[in-house]
Image: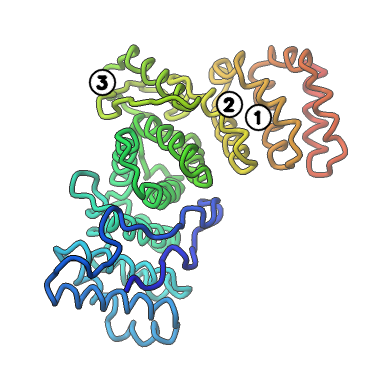
Amino acid sequence: MCGLDPRGSRDPAVPVVSPAGDGGKGERRSFGQSSSRLAAPRDTADLHQELCLYTLGNLIVESESVRRQLLPQGIVPALASCIQSPHLTVLEALGYALSQLLQAKEAPKKIIPSVLSTPLPQHMLQLLQPGPKLNPGVAVEFAWCLHYIICSQVNNALLITHGAVSTLGLLLLYLAGAVQRSEDAGLELLLCPVLRCLSNLLTEGAGGQVHLRDERVVVSLFIILQFLLQKQPSLLPEGLWLLNNLTGMSHNLPRRGPLDTGKTSLWLGLWWAGLRGGVFRPQLERLTFSLPANSPGFCTSLLSLDLIEPLLQLLPVSNVVSVLVLTVLCNVAEKGPAYCWRLWPGPLLPALLDTLAASDTEVVGQSLELLQLLFLYRPEAVQAFLQQSGLQALKRHEEEAQLQDRVHALQQTALHR
């Protein structure tokens, strides 16, 4: 009765924005409910509606000809009418059917514009509102629906107008709190689409329309990164890509009230212990933060909360993770001398020397970019680099075609400072 697994279907994610492929798609879980969707006694009409939706979802994914017949018959308005159902099982089935429809190759031109013209987007966002009424099964289905709509780039401005960024940001904080309370049953299934949706929407903000300006987002994201490191490392790139997009923004963070430095230090110690295998239970909902009005946002958050070293601890996980970590650090270093003064001295330079020993061209290339920025804004780091056999580390890449120019440029910088 469950039909085809929507997580096994084609994912139209935009590669530039969501680099982690289908890593977040896994086997559907029951979220603590009975494995049979017919186990609990329900109203006959409710059951009939649920079964129809799953059947439609299966037909939609299997046949383009079926989709061509359903569209002129009003499948989108019919699905939109189901969103008002008070039954969670019907809503989850609706999310399944809609997710199949939104993944169709013709969706950006023929389906998503129709969906956006209905109340479906507003209702989807309402179903993703954090709180005790949030249902994991329903939320997972509609989070993926939202992801497919965002990746189509048909009209993301409309979603932003409906408050998508704010809703997803609050949901991220809520999920981090659930991790703290060890309420993680099936949690990674919701984390992946939420992280992707936020990452993709932030790229719409080149003109300054998108503001995600709560420093607690950084705290939440690092809590989630630790959870993923322990439970599902394959999803780490999703969180790091969001961090990359956040640190690439230039919007200022507003003041949120007094910063309790003692509480922040306590949180950092607990988080750091957790990363090293200990137990952490920071009370995220009790933390408030304040940043200078002229702060360049999330890059300042990483420094003020001493999160550079925990970030560096993720480097050994994989080449993909290494590249994303180094890219985030480049975002910080690009902000100028004041930021590089916070990056060195410290663990950054030894970590970069270790990455220069890697065989992956992309990892080494990103390390070279970061070293160039560090030497530009922190000339004192050059001497330390030379003393730690930095030139010898560079020599092993002199013959690599993709790296030659950058290696030579860095050698010249190091020798002539």
Front-most of 44 and 381? 44
Q: Residue at 48% across / 34% down in the picture?
A: 247
Among numbered discs 2 and 1, the one appearing first in the sequence: 2
Q: Secondary structure at mark 3?
A: loop
Height in image: 73 above or below 145?
Answer: below
Q: Secondary structure at mark 1?
A: helix
Contact, mark 2 vs mark 1 (Cβ under 8 Å): yes
Residue beneath label 1, please? 370
The C terminus: image quadrant? top right
Disc assigned to residue 257? 3
Residue type of the residue flagged with mark 2: Ala
Residue 348 x %, y %: 62, 22
Front-most of 21 and 293? 21
Residue type of the residue flagged with mark 3: Gly
Quadrant assignment, res 152: bottom left
Quadrant assignment, res 118: bottom left
Distance from the alpha carbon under mark 1 to that under mark 3: 34 Å
Q: Residues within 10 Å of mark 3 (few under 14, many from 20)?
A: few
Q: Secondary structure at mark 2?
A: helix
Height in image: 202 above or below 282?
Answer: below
Disc assigned to residue 340? none
Q: Residues within 10 Å of mark 2 (few under 14, many from 20)?
A: many
Count up the numbered dots.
3
Q: Residues within 10 Å of mark 1 (few under 14, many from 20)?
A: many
Residue 287 x %, y %: 29, 24
Quadrant assignment, res 181: top left
For residue 36, side relative to residue 409 (left or right): left
Residue beneath label 2, please? 333
Residue type of the residue flagged with mark 1: Leu
